[in-house]
Image (tube, rainbow, N blue to C red):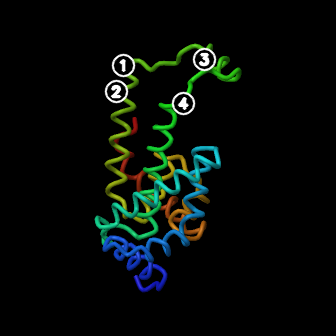
């Protein structure tokens, strides 16, 4: 890619891997707001989101040596590290907090359990494997936004911000990817 920002981001991540603190500061300046927004959308608490951002950048510092530009764009790698760390942060906080039911939750807890039968679980698992396998056959530029949407629940606007590409590009890539997925999976549809 000949995009100067892309090349600069690649170099910054590589420099972080070499222990350059100034490169980490530059990446922080570029990505901290986006990561904070992601953390807020997951954690719903300013203090926790700020803590999560610090954890994310600590993790970037530790993992930057494993970054490979041929595998993913630097912004994609950074946001992937952020996503995984924020989810881990959420899970660890959820395990350590008091789980007393709020009034709204008490109503939800009284609803009948909608467990799937064993057959339904097997079918769902089989279908998920088929979709994942078909996703792996797509070009990364199409599979990545579909994966972020389907498995992580991000909106197209959030994906555009995470991948640092225009919203229209995300929509086009997702549409093309869905068309290819549909064609790949048609033989399995009864």
Q: Which mark is residue 109?
A: 3
Q: Is residue 84 left or right of residue 43?
A: left
Residue 24 x/y as whole percent: 44, 71
- Is residue 87 at all visible to an observer of this figure? yes
* Residue sitting at x 44%, y 82%: 8
Q: Which residue position holds label 1?
A: 118
Q: Which residue position holds label 2?
A: 122
How much space separates mark 2 and mark 4, taking CA atoms?
Answer: 33 Å
Q: Callout 1 environment at 10 Å: few (<14), some (14 to 19), or many (20+)?
A: few
Q: Which mark is residue 97?
A: 4
How much space separates mark 1 and mark 2, taking CA atoms?
Answer: 6 Å
Secondary structure, mark 3, is helix
Specify the farthest residue to the right: 103
The answer to whether mark 3 and mark 4 are in CB contact below 8 A is: no
* Residue sitting at x 43%, y 76%: 23
How much space separates mark 3 and mark 4, taking CA atoms?
Answer: 18 Å
Q: Nearer the viewer, residue 160 or 125?
A: 160
The answer to whether mark 1 and mark 2 are in CB contact below 8 A is: yes
Residue 186 x/y as whole percent: 39, 46
Q: Tell me which numbered mark, 3 or 4, is placed earlier along the sequence.
A: 4
């Amino acid at each position: 890619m000949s995009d100067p920002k892309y090349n600069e981001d690649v170099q910054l991540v590589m420099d972080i891997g070499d222990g350059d603190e100034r490169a980490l500061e530059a990446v922080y300046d570029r990505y901290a707001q986006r990561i904070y927004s992601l953390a807020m959308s997951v954690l719903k608490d300013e203090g926790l989101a700020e803590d999560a951002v610090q954890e994310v950048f600590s993790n970037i510092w530790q993992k930057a040596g494993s970054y490979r530009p041929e595998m993913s764009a630097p912004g994609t790698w950074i946001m992937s590290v952020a996503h995984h760390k924020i989810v881990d942060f959420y899970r660890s906080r959820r395990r350590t907090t008091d789980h007393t039911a709020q009034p709204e939750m008490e109503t939800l807890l009284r609803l009948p359990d909608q467990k799937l039968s064993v057959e339904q679980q097997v079918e769902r698992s089989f279908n998920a494997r088929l979709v994942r396998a078909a996703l792996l056959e797509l070009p990364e530029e199409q599979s990545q936004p579909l994966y972020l949407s389907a498995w992580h629940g991000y909106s197209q606007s959030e994906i555009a911000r995470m991948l640092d590409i225009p919203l229209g590009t995300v929509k086009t890539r997702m549409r093309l990817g869905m068309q290819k997925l549909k064609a790949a999976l048609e033989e399995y549809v009864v």
